[in-house]
Image (cartoon, rainbow, N blue to C red):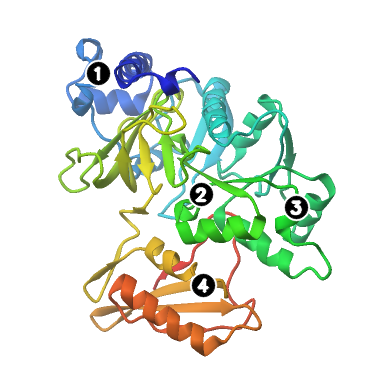
């Protein structure tokens, strides 16, 4: 896999075509969900065998999350997207349900190992290896989250330390006690740990700890410059971003040499960037919806999956030597995150980009409400104890006006009034 990451584009694309042909041959007739979809598109086994990829990729039908949810409702509890007999499935996870009913997702030993191998690419990009001690600060619940990251850690020979079921104070005490070199968490929780660390009387600053790298995922914050900068200053460590989905797997990773870009793991995924309205490809350098086909998770595959993630793809080689396509700025937003407020399209990431520039803001929450026929946007913020509230509010209002073209009321709330999050944060509320 290391060599193919640096192969010329022609070799890489031919590799993807062979893998996709193998996948389709493995699932047609065995996977009920995709056999029906492919047959419905006029693609029986003989037709599939005659296709030549990637040129014929557009002949394959898209998959939407709503279809998978409906399939599980029609054939509970697992649906029909499984390729193997149910007795072969050994892992259960579910989506975080931030956009509706959670999906249940199963893996066999083989498909789980494929995802673990994808996470090894994340570690290679982050320069994490067998000499590292990695602290995993997540709940170890049914959300896929960092489970595959944990298994990949011990397989590469690193020291994997689970920190589920602990308070933030206990996790910080563990950092002091065992000196991890890497922490794996969401961007939100990296900031939360920094907030708690600042409240410990007499303790050394977090930037003096042993941690040199934070691998973050689950939210776009790792690729939002202001959020990333705050994490790196608080920890005195490098942030490496990553993104994936429960139903797709670990898709992309940042390399050490090029901050602000996510390499797509193209040896294991085919990623298209399409106009979400016309469903036509967009040129490199223009934003579009990320559509993913995974090539190695044959036991529970997704083909041409419409993720709803908005990205900008670049194909030119990276300074690290990889020839994999890169997503500039990571996941910019989601198609279902956009809300129109008084004629202006507002995205949560745009609000975070402004708020995180203010070091005095400890936590925030934006709320979209309906007043009559119009929607309004307001912001609540918690400030550090000695901050000048009125001055910061005035500056925030001005910066938000410049960035969004809206006058956003900003209200100060008491310290600790806003919720804290360990996994995906919910700071954008629509009432």
Q: Which residue in the structure is indicated by mark 1?
A: 53
Q: Does 371 sit left or right of 430 as displayed? A: left
**Residue 30 appears anywhere in the view:** yes
Foreground mark, 2 or 4? Answer: 4
Residue at point 36%, 52% (across, down): 332
Q: Residues within 10 Å of mark 4 (few under 14, many from 20)?
A: some
- In space, the residues marked 1 and 3 are separated at their CA atoms by 49 Å
Q: Which residue in the structure is indicated by mark 3?
A: 209
Q: Which residue in the structure is indicated by mark 2?
A: 218
Q: Which badge, 4 or 1, comes first in the chain's sequence? A: 1
Residue 338 falls in image quadrant: bottom left
Query: How many numbered discs, if any?
Result: 4
Residue at point 81%, 55% (across, down): 173
Residue 307 image offset from top left, x and y in percent:
35, 43
Helix, strand or loop at label 1? It is loop
Residue 225 image offset from top left, x and y in percent:
46, 57
Residue 180 image offset from top left, x and y in percent:
75, 43
- In space, the residues marked 2 and 4 are separated at their CA atoms by 23 Å
Residue at point 77%, 50% (across, down): 175
Q: Which residue in the structure is indicated by mark 4?
A: 358
Foreground mark, 3 or 2? Answer: 3
Q: Nearer the viewer, residue 224 or 292?
A: 224
């Amino acid at each position: 896999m290391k060599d193919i990451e640096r192969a010329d584009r022609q070799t890489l694309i031919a590799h993807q075509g062979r893998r996709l042909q193998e996948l389709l041959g493995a699932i047609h007739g065995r996977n009920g969900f995709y056999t029906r979809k492919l047959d419905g598109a006029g693609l029986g086994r003989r037709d599939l065998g005659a296709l030549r990829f990637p040129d014929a990729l557009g002949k394959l039908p898209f998959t939407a999350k709503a279809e998978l949810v409906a399939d599980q409702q029609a054939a509970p509890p697992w649906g029909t997207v499984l390729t193997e007999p149910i007795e072969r499935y050994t892992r259960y996870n579910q989506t975080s349900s931030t956009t509706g009913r959670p999906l249940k997702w199963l893996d066999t030993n083989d498909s789980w190992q494929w995802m673990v191998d994808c996470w090894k690419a994340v570690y290679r990009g982050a320069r994490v290896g067998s000499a590292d001690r990695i602290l995993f600060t997540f709940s170890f619940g049914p959300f896929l989250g960092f489970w595959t990251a944990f298994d990949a850690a011990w397989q590469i020979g690193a020291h994997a330390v689970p920190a589920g079921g602990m308070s933030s104070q206990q996790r910080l005490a563990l950092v002091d006690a065992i000196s991890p070199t890497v922490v794996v968490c969401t961007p939100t929780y990296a900031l939360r740990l920094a907030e708690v660390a600042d409240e410990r009387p007499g303790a050394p600053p977090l930037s003096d700890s042993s941690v040199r790298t934070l691998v973050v995922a689950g939210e776009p914050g790792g690729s939002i410059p202001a959020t990333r900068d705050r994490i790196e200053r608080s920890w005195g460590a490098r942030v490496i971003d990553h993104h994936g989905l429960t139903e797709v797997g670990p898709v992309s990773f940042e390399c050490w040499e090029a901050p602000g870009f996510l390499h797509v793991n193209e040896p294991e995924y085919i990623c298209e960037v399409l106009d979400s309205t016309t469903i036509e490809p967009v040129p490199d350098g223009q934003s579009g919806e990320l559509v993913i086909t995974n090539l190695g998770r044959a036991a529970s595959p997704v083909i041409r999956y419409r993720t709803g993630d908005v990205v900008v793809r670049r194909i030119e080689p990276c300074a690290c030597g990889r020839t994999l396509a890169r997503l500039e700025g990571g996941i910019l937003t989601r198609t279902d995150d956009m809300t129109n407020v008084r004629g202006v399209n507002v995205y949560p990431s745009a609000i975070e980009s402004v708020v995180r520039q203010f070091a005095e803001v400890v936590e925030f929450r934006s709320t979209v409400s309906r007043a009559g026929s119009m929607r309004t946007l307001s912001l609540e913020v918690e400030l550090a104890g000695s901050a000048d509230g009125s001055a910061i509010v005035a500056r925030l209002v001005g910066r938000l006006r410049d960035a969004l073209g809206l006058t956003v009321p900003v209200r100060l709330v008491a310290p600790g009034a806003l919720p804290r999050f360990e996994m995906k944060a919910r700071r954008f509320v629509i009432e």
